[in-house]
Amino acid sequence: MKRWLVTGGLGFIGSCFIRLVLQTRHDVEVVNFDAMTYAANPENCKAVEHDARYRFVKGDIADASAVASAIGDGVDAIVNFAAETHVDRSILNPEHFLRTDVLGTHVLLEAVRARGVKRFLQVSTDEVYGHVARGESREEDALCPRSPYSASKAGGDLQVLAYWTTYGTPVMITRGSNTYGPHQYPEKLIPLFVTNLLDDQPVPVYGDGLQIRDWLHVEDHARAVLHVLENGEPGNVYNIAGGNARTNLEITRALVEHCNRSMETHVRHVTDREGHDRRYALNCEKLCSLGWSPQVRFEEGLRQTVEWYRQHEDWWRPLKDGKFAAYYQRQYAHR
């Protein structure tokens, strides 16, 4: 049996990856290492919690002793999903992002070196490339992050590549586009808007809503990470694109229609986010040449996502109480 350490495995993409691995790779054991911050949810791994090949360990990737304990007798690979990820929260509190995304990545890299881990995969984001006015970002392009979140992720990525160059550490990086689907914490655009609309509440569209993002279904993202882990070459970066570029306003209109609401009554344009990147776009020919391609059609994936939130109020309603309500008020009331 192989043993993989998956950090941040109670989160949105990490939990999808764990479910995929345990369903399709019967020779793999998974250690799920998660600090259980606000966006982590044990319900995300409920389907596998009784699998004998699954073990959960609570801990922080910035804590070297906790990482060493989770590795135990050894692991064959580490896949790092653990991160602070929400741009709006990074503007409010950048320090948390530096600790997890930069220091935490460093701690994991040192563990890989010390324990002889065979493969380390850093899960990153298209946002490290910054605003892309024309064309598509390629893996060799310079990084130009423009928010505290993307800067912290870029810092982690640069450490990963430095460890490859300096120590020959067997590392790889994936950079995914905007990811959507079931089990996403309701602060991000699609789950926030869906849950607001299901509650007959307005949705806050930043500025004119013409910011462009490429959308990638979470199952396609998880499959891509697994494909790179098993087939990628150490020292390489792989972009993961969904091929579904849409403006935020187009996404909003589709969600309003799916929820049987009205653009006139349920859309509220608010002051744009500070330093808001206008457009992201990824070229993922490199990953496709390895044999991966997205499988979920966007229109169907979006419809299924809305339906999932409609049918799983018991999952998201508790998340929008208490601290989230206070955050939402702080984030949007002044806009």
Image (tube, rainbow, N blue to C red):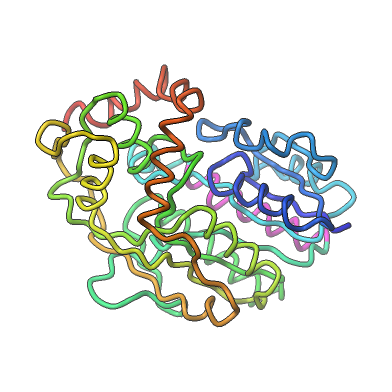
From the viewer's side, name the closer residue of 309 and 58.
309
Residue at the spot 71% in from the left edge and 54% down from the top edge: 21
1 vs 89: above or below? below
33 vs 284: above or below? above
Which quadrant of the figure contains the N terminus?
bottom right
Position in image of residue 124 (x %, y %):
51, 59
Position in image of residue 294 (x %, y %):
49, 66
Q: Main secondary structure of the magenta part?
A: helix
Left or right: residue 92 versus residue 152 is: left
Residue at the spot 46% in from the left edge and 80% down from the top edge: 140
User: Is residue 110 part of the magenta span, yes or no?
Assistant: yes
Left or right: residue 77 versus residue 45 is: right
Residue at the spot 86% in from the left edge and 46% down from the top edge: 72
215 vs 286: above or below? above
Left or right: residue 159 versus residue 308 is: right
Q: In the rendered picture of this protein, how many numbered marks are placed on residues?
A: 0
Q: Which residues are magenta?
A: 97-115
Residue at the spot 77% in from the left edge and 58% down from the top edge: 25
Position in image of residue 260 (x %, y %):
24, 35
Position in image of residue 279 (x %, y %):
26, 63
Residue farthest toward the left in the current orientation of the protein = 264
Which quadrant of the figure contains the C terminus?
top left
The image quadrant of residue 166 is bottom right
Residue farthest toward the top in the current orientation of the protein = 322
Left or right: residue 262 versus residue 320 is: left
User: Is residue 91 part of the magenta span, yes or no?
Assistant: no
The image quadrant of residue 193 is top left
